[in-house]
Amino acid sequence: MRVGMGIVLFGWLAWGLVVGCGTSTGKEHTAKDGSTQAEVSQEALEHDGSVEQSLEVAPTTDENQRPEPNLPEEQTTEADPVEATTENVAQDTTPQESSNTEVVPEQTSLTDCKMTHSSDLSGVSIDMTSTRCRFTLAEIAQGQKLSYLVKIGATQVKGLTFYSKQQDGGGCQQPGSSGLRVFYRIQGGGQNYCICDTGLCQGNSDFVSLQGGEFAEAFDWDGKNWNGPSDTGNPKGAAFPAGTYTLTLKIVGNWKASPDGPETPFTVMATKELVLSP
């Protein structure tokens, strides 16, 4: 009986020890689990916080990076005014490519000199509109062709005959392409150029019929004084100095309406300035 009670008591003690140890172990386990849980939770929180921070930073980084791809677009947009400026320059230059036409007035000025015309022969005139009248001394020294037109109206000269006189000293002047003799002289300021003396010739007073039209004629001049070669080979004189001179073209003669009819004198003349510059 005592033995049995001892066994029962020993069993109870053992059970208490087991339960006590188990509870203590359970507490330590719980404490360890708690601390582990706390550490895990803290780590989780820290981890979650870093993730949240990363997530918050990521959009900020994306927003900061978004304009960068748009920079070329902004530059492209800014390029439009540059193109407009280029167009404006082209338009501005257009006006300069149009100012490079100032050469035309210069060419026109070569013939824009004072002129006079006179004629008492109906239908006949001398036109020096196309005659160049401005030269440098170097240009004229190279020799220039001075041109003019003799204009004859066919209706006015029909049925008439004409005689144009030789105006040189020796009677050697010959008719031009118009059928009339045109005498020319350049003079002024003591300077003179003409073919006034070519020697002695047998003149004629033949009357001729004229054809209507415009007849281009010309003579050469190198800017020097001269009265003609005469029959002794007169040399040319000094060059004209810079200045303004007068070119005179003249036709003088007679006309008649029938072979035995009276002769009527006529004079056709034109003058034009010639300007020589240094």
Image (cartoon, rainbow, N blue to C red):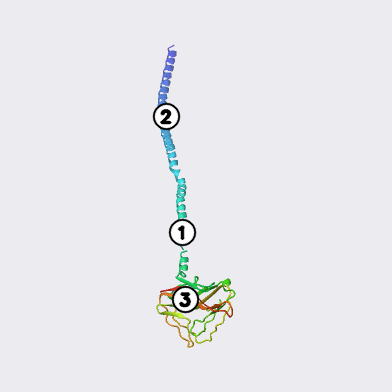
Q: Nearer the viewer, residue 61 or 140?
A: 140
Say whether residue 115 is visible: yes
Residue that appears at 46% across and 59% down: 95
Tag 3 residue: 248
Q: Quadrant of residue 43?
A: top left
Secondary structure at badge 2 equals: helix
Disc 1 designates what residue?
95
Give the structural element (helix, strand or loop) at label 3. Answer: strand
Q: CA distance from mark 3 to mark 2?
A: 129 Å
Residue sitting nearer the eye, 34 or 146: 146
Pointers 1 and 2 in contact (CB under 8 A)? no
Of 39 and 196, nearer the camera is 196
Q: Amino acid at mark 3?
A: Thr
Q: Amino acid at mark 1?
A: Pro
Residue furthest to the bottom: 232
Residue at the image point whose x is 42% and y is 24% from the top: 26
Which residue has dot 2 on it? 37
Does residue 131 appear in the picture of this structure? no
Q: Quadrant of the N terminus?
A: top left
Q: Position of residue 45 (x, y in %)?
A: 41, 32
Q: Nearer the viewer, residue 244 or 248?
A: 248
